[in-house]
Image (cartoon, rainbow, N blue to C red):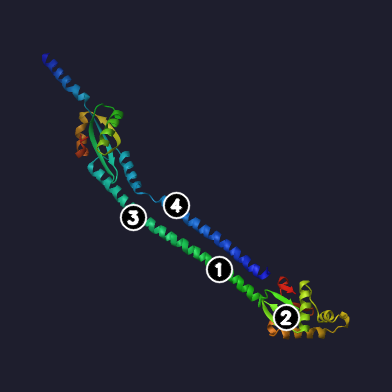
């Protein structure tokens, strides 16, 4: 019983912050010459519209233009996108 | 204004109008072509925009290699559009040349047509009498401002013929003789009038010129081959 509650507590303790962590994968460009990149970035809310606004600002500061946000996902989706995003994985 | 010269200047005026319209049409057409050309050639960003759309629309184009490929595609498109820009200037220069050549050929064409018309007019009329002034006082006739002295009798004959020409009449030898001598036409000899015409022709010199000036109309008589407007008597 104690084991079970401990395990449950651990699970909740682990799960809560994990639930709050949201990531988005996006596409961005730079003009003259045209440069494109696909990247993954952490966002504050698991919502596409919020992620879009947030990322647009962040990318603009670095001279990039956000093209679109593909999806918003939790940490479980990070691994499969790591290879594609490469240098832009969690950079912005 | 003389009828023959006015017809030439009329055709010249018509030719000038054709030239003006033709040049306007050529310039308009080639200007339109140039504008069309400049508007239709894609600018450098057209390729980039296509590549960008491709990138946005395909969600699975995410790996680094694919993106690199897209960038190369955009770059080659951009360099191609730079080539197109240089082509555009070359084409524009060629268009300008084409305009100049077309205008030149049009002007030459119209000039040739006008000259042909003038030449055929000259060929038709042989010797052109632009003005013919008969002066009784000076006893001379001025043909195209060249003075020809005449005897009293020859001048009389010429004056009679000129008056007849103004009335669009053809005089027989007998009629000429009747007018000059003041006798009745029935009493006059055809040969007397013919002699007067012959003397007039002789007085004017060259038979050919005279033949052209004082024409014989078979079985009808004699008439001056001069435009009515060209005749003047003082």
Q: Are marks 3 and 1 in contact (CB under 8 Å)?
A: no
Task: Identify the disc placed on residue B83.
Answer: 3
Q: Position of residue B6 (x, y in %)?
A: 65, 67
Separation of residues labelled 2 and 3 (CA atoms): 80 Å
Q: Which residue is mark 1?
A: B111
State the residue position of label 2. B140
Q: Chain of mark 2?
A: B
Q: Residue at x 62, y 67 (%)?
A: B9
Q: Which percent across, then down, holds residue A77?
A: 22, 31
Identify the disc placed on residue B36.
Answer: 4
Residue B218 is at least partly visible in this image: no
Crowd around label 4: few <14 · some 14–19 · many ≥20 (10 Å): few
Which of pointers 2 and 3 lies earlier in the amino acid sequence?
Answer: 3
> What percent of the width, then of the height, locates residue A84?
22, 39
Pointer 4 chain: B
Mark 1 to mark 2: distance in Å?
39 Å
Please tell me which of labels 3 and 1 falls first in the chain: 3
Task: Name the residue nearer the viewer: A14 or B103.
Answer: B103
How far is disc 3 from disc 1 in space, using C-alphas?
Answer: 42 Å
- SS assignment at label 3: helix
Q: Earlier in the sequence, mark 4 or mark 2?
A: 4
Residue visible at 11% across and 14% down in the picture:
A2
Quadrant (top left/top right/bottom left/bottom right) for the N terminus of chain B: bottom right
Q: CA distance from mark 4 to mark 1?
A: 32 Å
| Residue B139, placed above or below residue A17 | below
Q: Residues within 10 Å of mark 3 (few under 14, many from 20)?
A: few
The span from disc 4 to disc 3 (Cα, nearest Å) is 18 Å
């Amino acid at each position: 019983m104690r084991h079970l509650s401990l395990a449950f507590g651990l699970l909740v303790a682990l799960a809560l912050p994990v639930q709050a962590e949201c990531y988005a994968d996006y596409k961005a460009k730079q003009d003259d010459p045209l440069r494109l990149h696909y990247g993954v970035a952490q966002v504050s809310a698991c919502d596409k519209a919020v992620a879009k606004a947030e990322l647009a600002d962040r990318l603009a500061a670095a001279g990039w233009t956000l093209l679109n946000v593909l999806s918003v996902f939790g940490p479980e989706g990070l691994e499969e996108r790591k290879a594609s995003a490469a240098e832009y994985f969690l950079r912005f | 204004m003389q009828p023959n010269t006015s017809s030439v200047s009329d055709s010249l005026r018509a030719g000038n109008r054709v030239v003006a319209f033709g040049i306007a049409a050529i310039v308009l057409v080639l200007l339109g072509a140039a504008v069309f050309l400049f508007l239709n050639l894609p600018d450098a960003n057209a390729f980039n925009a296509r590549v960008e759309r491709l990138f946005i629309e395909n969600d699975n184009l995410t790996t680094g290699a694919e993106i690199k490929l897209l960038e190369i595609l955009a770059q080659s498109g951009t360099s191609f559009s730079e080539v197109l820009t240089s082509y555009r200037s070359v084409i524009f220069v060629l268009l300008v040349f084409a305009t100049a050549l077309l205008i030149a050929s049009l002007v030459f064409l119209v000039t040739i047509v006008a000259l042909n018309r003038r030449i055929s007019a000259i060929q038709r009329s042989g010797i052109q009498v632009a003005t013919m002034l008969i002066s009784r006082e000076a006893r001379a006739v001025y043909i195209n401002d060249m003075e020809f002295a005449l005897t009293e009798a020859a001048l009389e004959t010429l004056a009679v013929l000129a008056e007849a020409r103004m009335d669009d009449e053809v005089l027989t030898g007998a009629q000429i003789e009747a007018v000059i001598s003041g006798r009745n036409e029935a009493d006059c000899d055809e040969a007397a009038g013919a002699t007067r015409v012959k003397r007039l022709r002789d007085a004017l010199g060259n038979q050919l010129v005279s033949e052209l000036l004082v024409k014989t109309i078979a079985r009808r008589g004699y008439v001056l081959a001069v435009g009515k407007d060209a005749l003047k008597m003082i």
